[in-house]
Structure formats: C-alpha cells, structure tokens
Image (cartoon, helix red, strand yellow):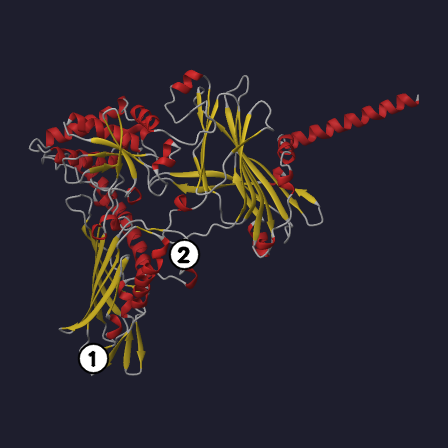
Amino acid sequence: MIKLSRLLLFCSCLLLALQLQAQETAADPNAEERQKIWDAGGADFELSQVPEQWLEESKVVLSDLYLYNFIVPEAEPVYSYEMVRRRVKLLDKAAVEEYSELHFPQDALVGIRVEKQDGEVTYVEADSAIPYAEEVVTSADERLELGYFKYAIANLAEGDVLDFFYRNKLTYNNEYFQISEPVTQLMACDLPVVKQKIRFELPEQACLNFGSYNGAAEIQEVEDCPNKRCFEQVDTMRAVYEEDLWDYPYRSEPLVKFQAFRYASDFALDLSFLFLDAKQIPKSSISKKEISTYFDELVEPDYSMRQVVKDIVDYVERQHTEVKSPGQKASLAYYYFRHKFLFDEAAFGEELTDEGISDATFVSIMKLALQRLNVPHECIIAMPVSSGVLEELLLHQELVYLIEVPDSDFKYLFNFDAYTNAGDLYYTMEGADAYRVFGEGLHDLELPISEAEDNVTEEFKMLTLDEDLKTVHMIRRIEHKGHNRQNDWPVVLYAEDYHREYTKQPKKKRKSRKKRKREQAYQAMLDQQAEEMSRERDLYMKDETMAEMQGTVENYKPIKILSHGRSHQSPVLAYVQEFDIVDYIQKAGNNYLIDIGKTIGSQVEILEEGKTRSKDIRMPYARTFRSEVKLKIPEGYSVEGLESLNTSVANSAGLFTGTAVLEKGYLKINTEKKYLKAFLPKEDWPLILDFLEAAYNFTQQKVVLKPN
C-alpha cells in the first residue's frame, strides 16, 4: 500500500512537470532552444571581472561570440544560422541608460538576461517585446519598413552584467549552392573587448574562405564539433577603436575577412567558378588563374542585357553617323548608357538594384557594345586601395571591373552613377594594383594617381557692407573639377537638371485640346516637383554654407548653376550663391572689426592630442583649393591689419599661402592650399601640420575698418 502511494505520488509529480513544461512551451515555443544557447556559452560567458586598465570605461565587453553554421536537414532545404552573443558589464549611469532598451530584428531568436553583483540572474521574457517599424528610404520614390522588436530591460544598475544574443535564420533560393554574405570585420570596435571569438561549424561539402590581416590572430581548427568541422579565431584584450583623420582602417587595423559556402554535390562545386577549394579549408589566398576563370564566366551579358547593348549601338551608329573616331564612339556609347541607366530603369530588370548595376553588368554591356562598334579596348580587374592590395584578395565581391580605351582622350570607363564622366576613376582606385585582361592571362598594372592640379576648387567672393556696417553681403562663385566635384554634385544637381539631355524636340503638329491639356498637366506636375526639390536643395545648401562660412546666413537666394560638369569635355561643376552674413562685424568704439579670415571657408583644426600620429597618412587624393576675396571698402573708411594675412608655408607635403593688398577701393585677398600627395608616411605628419595650422590660423584673422 505504501509502495502504491509512492508510485501514485511520483506519477502525479511527473504529470505536473509535464503539464508545466507544456505550458511553458506553449507560452514560449523557443524556450528550449534558448536554453541550449545559454548552456553552450562555456567559461567565456561566466566572466564578470573587468581588467584594471578599463575600470574607468563606461562599459566593457567581457565576451563576444560570432557563430556561423549551415544546417542540412534530411527532408528540408539547407539553411544557416548567424548568431551574435555578447556579455557586457555596465560601469556607469550612461551605460545603464544606453542598455535599458535593446532592439533586434523581428525575425531573430533573442535571449536576454541580467546578472546582478550578488549573483542573482533574471531573464527578460520573450513576450515582453514590443514590435515597431523603422522607415528606411531606399530611393527617391521607394520607402521600406524594417520590422524590429524593442525590449525594455528593467531595474538595471551600475555593476550589472548584461548577457544577450540574437540569432538569424537564413534561407536560400538555390538548393544546389548556398553562399553566406561576405564579412570584413575589424577586431576593434566602439568599446573595449576582453575576449571575442568567431566560430564556424561546417557540415560536409562546405568551404570557408578566411583571412587574417594587419596582425589579427590566425584561425584554428578545433575538435569539439561532432559530425562537423569547426574553426575558431580568438582575439583578446582589444581596446576601443579610435578613428584617425585620413586613414583607411582596412589597411592599418587588425581585421578578418571571411565567407562560407555549402554545395550539394561536387558537380555544383565545379560549376560555381568562385574562389573555392574543398581540399583547403579554410582558404586564405587567391591565384591569378582563379581570378581569370571567375572573370571569364562573370562578364557575359544575358539575353535581356543584349537589348540594352543594341539600344546603345543603334544610338551611336544611327544618330551619329559622322563620328568615326573609336574614342568618340566610346564616349557617345558611355554617356548614352549612363542616361539609359538613369531614366530607363525597366530596361535593366533584375540587374538594377538600390546600388545601381554591378561592375560586372556594366563591363559586360559596355564590352559587347564596344565590340560591335569596332572600338579597341581591354578589361581591367582591380581592388580598391581602401580595401587592401591584390595579394590580399579573398572575396570575389572585393573586385572592381572597368574598361580601358587606349585610343581616346579619357582612357578609362568606370561603372557610373548620375555624375560619373568618361575617364573618371573613383579616388579609392587611384594607384590600385590591377590586372589587364588580354591574351591567355592577366597582366600586372597600376592604375594612375591624380595630382593636386587635377582636383581643384576655386572660389571667387565679392563682399559689400550694408550702410549700417552690420551685415556682409556675399556673392560667391564656386568651381570644382576632378574629385573635388564629388561632395557637391549630389546636392547641387538633381535629375530635373539633366533629364532632357537626350530628348529630341518633336516636329510641331496639331494636337487635340484634350491632349494639350494632358501634356500641360503633366508638365505642371514636373515643374511642381522641380520647385519642391529646388527648395529642399536651397535649405540644405544654406545650412552647409553656414557651416562652411562659420557665420549666420540670411536672405539666401536660390543657387544658379553655371555648368553641370557631367562630361569629360566640360568637366567643371560651377554655381553661384548669394546671401548675407550677419555676424562677421563687431563694433569697437569708432572702429569695426571684420572676421575676414572666415571668408576663405572653414579649415581643418588639429587639436593637441592629434599632433602625434602612429599611422601612415592615407588621404583620398591630392587636391588644390584657391580662394579670391574682394571686399569693397566703404567710402570714408580705411583698412588696417593686412600684415597677418600675408603668409606662406610650403614643404614637400603641401602648402598654404595668403596675400592681401589694397587695390582700387577694394581689399583683395588670395589664398591657396595644396595637398601634394595622397599617401605619406607617418613621419611626414609634422609637414602636414605646418600648412594646416597656417590655414586654420588664417581663418582667425580680422581686419580693422577705421574712419578716415
């Protein structure tokens, strides 16, 4: 009887436990999966002590884990998981406030727990998440809502350890071959990290490309991975990443690059033409032969793109029958291709993305068009200098493709945006290692480097003072050429400025009243859009001008565009601004002080902590800035204080010069600043400081306006 009672009691307890587990699973169907992730953390996720050198930090990452794997179910398609787990200690109120709310993608599996200093552990319930959407503008006409979950972390306090993870499931359309996203990851981030680990769990028929650069630790194979091959890269005691002026971090900071692949059969692997090797896992280098094979398979336009090729060729051959020069044919083809890309999106179908068309698509179309136009050309394969050198190539996404046209006045054709001209090289490609494709192989090449006189900004400013000597009225003409156009181009120009560049004027013919009304309504809509865009542009330009001129701008008039600069035959972007500045003049007794130095525009200021440097200097490109300022001197006044405006500093890195003279009732000031080289060793930093400080000091100078 006693045994029976015990048996009944045991069965009752078991039934109750099963009921509780069923309730928990119903409330949170992922509870068991979350627990597995918590349990798999190991000793790394038991750390709680902060190293002494970081005790004054706001927060410190005790452990980071980045996990990548492929899952191969028996009856389902292959999928993969990408998981990030972080254990961070909060050391002050700012950190507590920052981490009191966490956001994660809506489809991610999330786990959050808080460990108090007395050892108490609390978990944030999964059903406490609040869904919300963040609107992202992907183009001028399209907006995308991204779904997120927001978690409130209650009762956080200084000294708490916050441990959380999120895991994304990735599915693939191709059942024969699965490719993870390429990753380039700096070891340092925006807070100090005691230990971080990147881990890969790979099933059979998987490949991994992985490279360590600039002193990052190498990857190692580990044994605690049944039925899989596992690899880990471990990094420890990594201080906060500190951004330096004029630096390419991928060239100077420890980092890793990687991409994982899984193939259904050896046949699928053979057809991939990617940089893979099933016998070398992980793979850390790429041969010329692999690049050549991949390029040959990549650069071949499909049927839909051949119609684009036909349109380009027809335009050149039928509308420009007088053109015989190969270079002229190439430029006509290029600019028409650019126009079609901007205003005939439907022609590109799936090849057109939010980023435009790929380099491969551009080269495929342009190459075939030039072949049909009998224009001699070669293809170029390169890697941006901002990413590294070709011998460090690991991911096929790192490559850039362009076309060389030897018999032309521009030489290179590059994938375009709305503004790129024939002959333009992106500044990140200057001096890049490259391969020219001809014959049976690839031939070494170095892309050219522009000089300071190739990238020039010239400004001409006319200044007059109002009768009360309180306001400066400025008319400012700005001319950019070379790379210096890039910052202003997207702001100053918009599609309405050039969408009619290939529109033919139709022959006049009688139209019905109904058709005329439709056309008038459509034109009115375009005019309204242009007016709205013009207003937005001028509001933005006013703010930018205030920052540049370091003064309060009023009465800002719409800019006047003098030249678009969207052709290599007319490469200057030029426009005029007109406005008032109300805080350049200060009264001092009977005299007036004028902030004349500010009229040349803001200059780089190097603070004391930036005057020592441990990294080489990698500027975007060599460049020149010239400014001419003419201030009309009011009648009955004279100007003093010109001595401080006459200055000159010049060395092998660059220069800054300033001159000021009185000329026919005007104060005339000319300045010039040049960065002579894009790359300099860190030992030359003092040379750069010399002319930067001279330029900044110039902006602090004033002149005195005295009554006669």
The disc, 1 or 2, on the residue closer to the chain's N-terminal end is 2
Find residue 436 and report its horizontal and vertical position in percent: 25, 32
Are there few (<14), some (14-19), or many (20+) residues within 10 Å of tag 1?
some
Task: Determine the image quadrant of residue 629.
Answer: bottom left
Q: Is residue 407 above or below residue 249?
A: above
The residue identified by callout 2 is 613
The residue identified by callout 1 is 637
Which residue appears farthest toward the left when viewing the image?
A: 322
* Front-most of residues 328 and 148: 328
Q: Is residue 152 above or below residue 661?
A: above
Which residue appears farthest toward the front when viewing the image?
A: 683
Q: Is residue 334 left or right of residue 134?
A: left
Find residue 30 and report its horizontal and vertical position in percent: 62, 31
* Front-most of residues 99 and 325: 325
Query: What kind of element bears circle 2?
Result: loop
Residue 309 seen from this side: yes
Find residue 377 and report its horizontal and vertical position in percent: 19, 31
Task: Determine the image quadrant of residue 322.
Answer: top left
Are there few (<14), some (14-19), or many (20+) residues within 10 Å of tag 2?
some
Screen quadrant of the N terminus? top right
* Front-most of residues 116 and 354: 116
